[in-house]
Image (cartoon, rainbow, N blue to C red):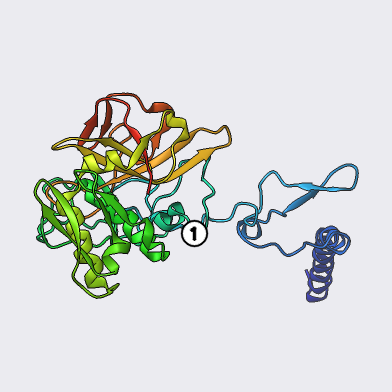
Amino acid sequence: MTEKKAIIIAALLGGIVLMLLIVAIQPVTRFEDEYPMTAVSGPAASDGIMDTQTNTSGEESPSALPSASENPEPVPTEEPVLSATGIPCVNPEGNTLETRVNTPDGFTRTKEDINGLGTYLRDFKLKKDGSPVLLYNKQEKENQYAHVAVFKLPLEKKDLQQCADSVMRVYAEYFRSKGEYSRISFSLNDDFKASYDKWREGYRIYESGSGYEWDDVADFDESNAAFKEFMRIVFSYAGTYSLDTDSEKVEKTEDIQIGDVFLQAGSPGHVVMVVDLCEDANGRKAFLLAQGYMPAQQFHLLKNPAHENDPWYYVDEVTYPFDTPEYTFEEPCLRRMNY
């Protein structure tokens, strides 16, 4: 083969190869010209899978594989902070009765007078979540498993302010906050009325034989010190019998109100106080109980021994004997104070 023939053959072969390349590339180029690929993100982009397909009607329909935007990665959420009590409805950040204890599912708190005892108790300040119940001498109470929260109710430094005294202290502090001094009046053990109004005027209470009498020996005084002195006299001479005298029986538990008490008068007797109330759409009611106890100790919100994770007591579950964490009331004993 001459050199000239070799050049001609090489040129022909090159032309043939070039034509084959043009034929191979042209369909792809035309497809992309007519159906350009749209930009996609996420796994679909790297896999070459588009977010949508075109169906026979010309409408876009979801792809068999959803896009990353349709199934986002789950966002980590913070675990709710649990109360030291371990009870789910107890909010450790709440500093009042209403903000500390949530109502059961489906229940709402009853509507109370803005100036009433119910509102006063719901707004009452509580000690920090997990606080122990302290005795009058600052020592911890032996049983620390009966309470949900501790009220910041003043406690005298002597063994005076026990169960009945705590109820009287709540009422006295409430009436005093409203300036209703004439309502701060408690029966002593022989039906003698210890009146704070009279005490403010300068009268003082003295034992006289088997009873008590007033003596006008001081000037008008409505200071905190004079109020505490009056309450110490009440605590010394009044008790569960006094509460029995100053109250009336509530015949139907369904009529329960904030401020009512479950009372067993005696020596010793016991009393617990209804401090909150809620109900559901069907009228089912639930309530919270609080107590002081012996020896004198801080007023505290009670657990419900029938429900480990719920401190609310349900009216339709109240039967007798009626169990509270540290006392069982043997007979119907719901009473309403006449202060």
Between 179 and 63, the one lying in front of the other is: 179
Q: Where's residue 230, x and y in %?
A: 22, 62
Question: How many numbered circles does the render carry?
Answer: 1
Q: What residue is at 10 percent from the left and 59 percent from the top? A: 158
Q: Badge 1: how crowded within 10 Å, few (<14), some, or many (20+)?
A: few
Q: What residue is at 26 percent from the left and 72 percent from the top? A: 224
State whether residue 265 appears in this view: yes
Image position of 130 (left or right of 13):
left
Between 251 and 299, the one lying in front of the other is: 251
Q: What residue is at 42 percent from the left and 58 percent from the top? A: 120
Image position of 217 (left or right of 65):
left
Q: Where's residue 238, x and y in %?
A: 20, 48
Image position of 282 (left or right of 262):
right
* Amino acid type of the residue that numbered disc 1 sits on in the rendered structure: Asn
Between 46 and 256, the one lying in front of the other is: 256
Can you say whether 211 is above or below 252 in the image?
below
In the picture, residue 55 is in which quadrant?
top right
Can you say whether 23 is above or below 188 in the image?
below
Q: Which residue is mark 1?
A: 115
Q: What residue is at 70 percent from the left and 62 percent from the top? A: 40
Secondary element type, mark 1: loop
Q: Where's residue 178, x and y in %?
A: 43, 64
Can you say whether 237 is above or below 325 in the image?
below
Q: Quadrant of the N terminus?
A: bottom right
State whether residue 132 appears in this view: no
Can you say whether 69 is above or below 260 in the image?
below
Q: Where's residue 133, x and y in %?
A: 19, 54
